Image: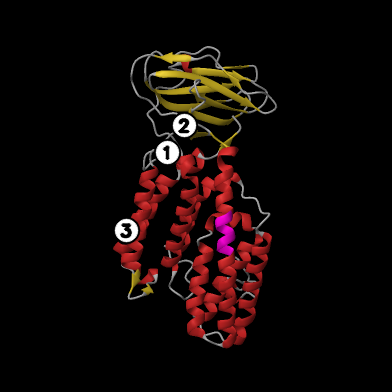
């Protein structure tokens, strides 16, 4: 599968979206043969322009092929998992400069083929310096600390929420429920590292036998349902206590937890993707009408990730300012239309036009966030 390793414009998603030349049969010179013993040993580009290189794997095992700037290893384009005796296309606009193919086969050293120089001063697809695991260690450490601080705050808040419910103070419990839930939602990038705790703390009843009546349903959404559907303190006190205990257990387990470096960039897109599906749609409204507040909390979580990744992205992703622009736009719309007279409005109360504006702004933010996962994928070369 080909993936873009370039700075992509808004509206581009997961591919280079560059015009390709004609097929390999019309351009036999663009068939690049690679193996674990050689990498594009004979190839030539006559002039700048859009090209489709047909990458043929002559080895007995699958491999990855990058087109790089041999001066610094920056990547113009890549194809992954090219199977033995198969051909995959690599599309890009070739500009003036130097190019070389680099091949990576498991259990073999990386091989860089001969350098091809394209004359002139014509710009082409930009090359992006690869991100290594070392580049991501500091962002991961900073985000780990952010989550630790958030969990400490959350533990205090769920204890207060439990006390509210036990004492029968429903009005205060509702307010403290929202405060605590938004704290948790700001930690969205860590949900995979939370393991089973995420389902226990923030799980939905979807798929459970009995749905909202399932005794297996626990966590914030279960409490929301009870607090806004007239359930008694006696019914809800055990649910609150379970939530409090789960948060304390998660907080205790967090210090030695390692965040997968692959997740750091990927979550910048996935947090808002989940918000679009479950919050802006109103799916996760179990009575409080606060899914727009949850979306705003998700934006905060996304911004935190972008902040810790900024040293990595600033020199690699030209559309980074557009990310801020669209997050600001979405947040402004949420505040203007979703927060009225000190209260959050349910999605169901919004006009169709407003919902379309929110969805559109979120879609645009997702468009410009999408390439970050590819750019920040750690590489060993």
Looking at the image, how many numbered discs can be counted on the residues? 3
Q: Are marks 3 and 2 in contact (CB under 8 Å)?
A: no
Query: Which residue is under mark 2?
Result: 128
The answer to which of marks 3 and 2 sits earlier in the sequence is 2
* Image position of 300 with respect to 78: above or below: below
Q: Do the residues labelled 2 and 1 touch (CB within 8 Å)?
A: yes
Q: Residue at x 63, y 58 (%)?
A: 194
The answer to which of marks 1 and 3 sits earlier in the sequence is 1
Measured as percent of width and height from the top left, residue 39 is found at 58, 18
For label 3, the crowd category at 10 Å Cα-Cα, with few meaning under 14, some 14 to 19 and many 20 or more, is some
* Image position of 46 with respect to 49: above or below: above
Q: Residue at x 55, y 57 (%)?
A: 146
How far is mark 1 from mark 3, CA to CA? 26 Å
Secondary structure predominantly adopted by residues drawn in magenta:
helix
Q: Give the range drawn in magenta.
A: 145-151
Question: Is residue 191 or residue 314 the one in the foreground?
Answer: 314
For label 1, the crowd category at 10 Å Cα-Cα, with few meaning under 14, some 14 to 19 and many 20 or more, is many
Per the image, label 2 sits on a secondary structure element best described as: loop
Name the front one of labels 1 and 3: 1
* Image position of 191 with respect to 210: above or below: above
Q: Which residue is drawn at 49% across and 31% down?
A: 129
Please give left or right for residue 306 compared with residue 121 in the image: right
Measured as percent of width and height from the top left, residue 154 is found at 56, 68
Query: Which residue is under mark 3?
Result: 357
Magenta segment includes 165: no
Per the image, label 3 sits on a secondary structure element best described as: helix
Q: Is residue 204 visible?
A: no
Magenta segment includes 150: yes
Q: Where does the C terminus fall, quadrant-wise?
A: top right
Query: Which residue is under mark 1?
Result: 317
Question: Is residue 363 or residue 120 the one in the foreground?
Answer: 120
């Amino acid at each position: 599968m080909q993936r873009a390793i370039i700075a992509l414009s808004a509206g581009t998603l997961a591919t280079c979206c560059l015009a390709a030349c004609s097929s390999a049969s019309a351009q036999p010179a663009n068939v690049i043969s690679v193996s674990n013993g050689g990498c594009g040993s004979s190839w030539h580009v006559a002039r700048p322009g859009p090209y489709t290189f047909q990458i043929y794997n002559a080895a007995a095992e699958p491999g990855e092929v990058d087109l790089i700037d041999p001066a610094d290893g920056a990547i113009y384009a890549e194809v992954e998992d090219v199977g033995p005796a198969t051909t995959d296309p690599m599309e890009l606009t070739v500009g003036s400069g130097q190019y070389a193919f680099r091949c990576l086969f498991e259990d073999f050293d990386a091989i860089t083929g001969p350098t091809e120089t394209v004359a002139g001063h014509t710009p082409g697809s930009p090359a992006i310096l690869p991100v290594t695991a070392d580049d991501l260690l500091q962002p991961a450490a900073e985000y780990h600390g952010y989550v630790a601080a958030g969990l400490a705050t959350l533990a205090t808040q769920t204890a207060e929420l439990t006390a509210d419910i036990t004492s029968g103070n429903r009005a205060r419990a509702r307010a403290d429920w929202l405060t605590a839930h938004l704290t948790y939602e700001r930690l969205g990038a860590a949900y995979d590292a939370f393991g089973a705790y995420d389902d226990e703390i923030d799980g939905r009843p979807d798929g459970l036998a009995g749905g909202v009546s399932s005794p297996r349903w626990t966590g914030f959404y279960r409490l929301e349902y009870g607090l806004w559907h007239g359930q008694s303190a006696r019914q809800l006190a055990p649910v609150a206590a379970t939530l409090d205990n789960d948060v304390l257990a998660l907080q205790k387990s967090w210090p030695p937890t390692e965040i997968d470096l692959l997740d750091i960039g990927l979550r910048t897109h996935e947090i808002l993707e989940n918000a679009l599906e479950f919050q802006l749609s109103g799916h996760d409204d179990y009575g409080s009408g606060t899914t727009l507040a949850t979306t705003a909390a998700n934006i905060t979580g996304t911004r935190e990730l972008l902040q810790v990744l900024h040293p990595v992205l600033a020199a690699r992703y030209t559309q980074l300012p557009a990310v801020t622009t669209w997050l600001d736009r979405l947040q402004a719309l949420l505040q203007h239309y979703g927060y009225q007279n000190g209260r959050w409005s349910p999605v169901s109360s919004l006009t169709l036009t407003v919902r379309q504006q929110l969805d559109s702004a979120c879609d645009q933010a997702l468009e410009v966030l999408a390439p970050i996962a590819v750019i920040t994928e750690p590489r060993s070369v």
